[in-house]
Structures are given as C-alpha cells and as structure tokens.
C-alpha cells in the first residue's frame, strides 16, 4: 500500500496534487491514505463482506475466465470480515493501476470520515468530491452502488474492463505484483 503521489500515473499525479491544494485553499485538509494498492489488498477489501460460497464461486469464475493470478489473489488472502467497502475485484480497481487516491479529512486536527460534521459550514468529503468533479475527475461519493467518499479516480469508467480483457488485466497484475 502506498500513500505517495509518485506512485500514480503521470497524468493523474499533478491532478491529485491540485485537488488537494484546491481543498486546502477552501480550508479543507485532506490527507492521502492510499494511492497504489496491490491486488492482494484489493482482494482483502472485496472478501471482507462476502460469504465463503460467493468467494469460492468468484475464484472459480476468474480461473475459468482466464485470470488465474487474480483468482490466486482472492484465495491467498484468506477469509476477511467487515462491512462492504468495494465491489471491485482484484485488478479491477483503478488503485491497482495508479489511477486512484483515497483520502481522510483532517477536521479540528483529527482524522474523520464523518459526512455530517461541518467546519466553517463545510463538510470536507463533500468539498473534496465537488472539487474533484469540477476538475473532470470521478469522485466515489457519486458512485451508484457503494458510495466511497474517500475515493477519487482519474477515469469515469467503472473498471479497467472497459479498456482491457480480463486475461490482459490478469497478465498486467501478475507482471506488476506477482508471482
């Protein structure tokens, strides 16, 4: 897991930096919690809200669809527990491609994920999402399924599947994060 802007793709890093500066100019301090995320970390996040049967079925489907590395990521991380935070399987989140950031809001000197707290009449996550959208970025606050207020990504596409086949994604992830 990385928190460095230098791990983002060159076309996104300066935009992410500008987004944080725009928030800061509005007296909203956002701190990066994650940039580049491994497919193993993504697998943990995806698995934490899924039953064993659902996980096993998805592992088999990934294998059948030509993505053995992604299947092994899901398998190797073991069972997880927690609230649902993502619908993106390993390799299918823009974090694995260096095209997404997650941030936490620093309000009154403390980290918070509150969507209700306001400081100076503003909620940090709402400002962050609005500024991202003004810049042409995609804010997770506006996702249709699981709202992901800490998340901002370069592309509007839901996943890399709109640009690559599952087998291509598997090969890229294995080369980048394997074995």
Image (cartoon, rainbow, N blue to C red):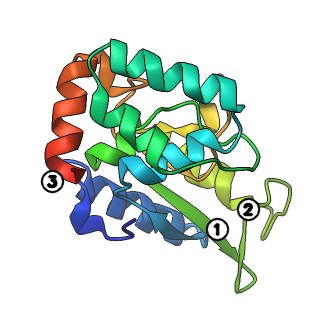
Name the residue beneath numbered marker 1.
105
Q: Cα distance, mark 1 to mark 3?
A: 25 Å
Identify the residue at the far right of this view.
Answer: 116
User: Mark 1 falls on what kind of element?
Assistant: strand
User: Mark 3 falls on what kind of element?
Assistant: loop
Q: Are marks 2 and 3 in contact (CB under 8 Å)?
A: no
- Nearer the observer, 27 or 82: 82
| Quadrant in the picture for residue 57 | top right
- Nearer the observer, 101 or 69: 69
Residue 69 x %, y %:
29, 36
Residue 99 x %, y %:
31, 45
Residue 32 located left or right of residue 10: right
User: Mark 2 falls on what kind of element?
Assistant: loop
1 or 3: tag closer to the N-terminus: 3
Q: Cα distance, mark 2 to mark 3?
A: 28 Å
Mark 2 crowdedness (10 Å alpha carbons): few <14, some 14-19, many ≥20: some
Q: Are marks 1 and 2 in contact (CB under 8 Å)?
A: yes
Instruction: Say which residue appears at 70% left-offset and 86% top-offset.
Output: 109
Residue 113: mark in rendering: 2
Name the residue beneath numbered marker 3.
10
Q: Cα distance, mark 1 to mark 2?
A: 6 Å
| Picture layout, residue 73 above or below residue 125 | above
């Amino acid at each position: 897991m990385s928190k460095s802007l230098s791990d983002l793709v060159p076309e996104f890093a300066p935009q992410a930096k500008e987004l944080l500066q725009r928030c800061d100019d509005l007296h909203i301090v956002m701190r990066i919690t994650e940039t580049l995320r491994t497919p193993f970390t993504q697998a943990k996040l995806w698995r934490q809200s899924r039953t064993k049967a659902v996980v096993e079925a998805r592992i088999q489907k990934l294998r059948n669809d030509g993505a053995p590395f992604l299947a092994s990521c899901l398998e190797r991380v073991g069972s997880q527990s927690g609230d649902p935070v993502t619908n993106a399987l390993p390799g299918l989140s823009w974090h694995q491609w260096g095209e997404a950031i997650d941030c936490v809001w620093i309000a009154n000197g403390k980290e918070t994920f509150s969507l209700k707290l306001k400081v100076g009449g503003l909620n940090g996550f709402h400002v962050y999402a609005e500024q991202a959208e003004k810049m042409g970025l995609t804010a997770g606050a506006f996702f249709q399924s699981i709202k992901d207020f800490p998340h901002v990504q370069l592309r509007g596409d839901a996943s890399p599947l709109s640009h690559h086949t599952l087998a291509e994604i598997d090969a890229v992830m294995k080369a980048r994060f394997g074995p």
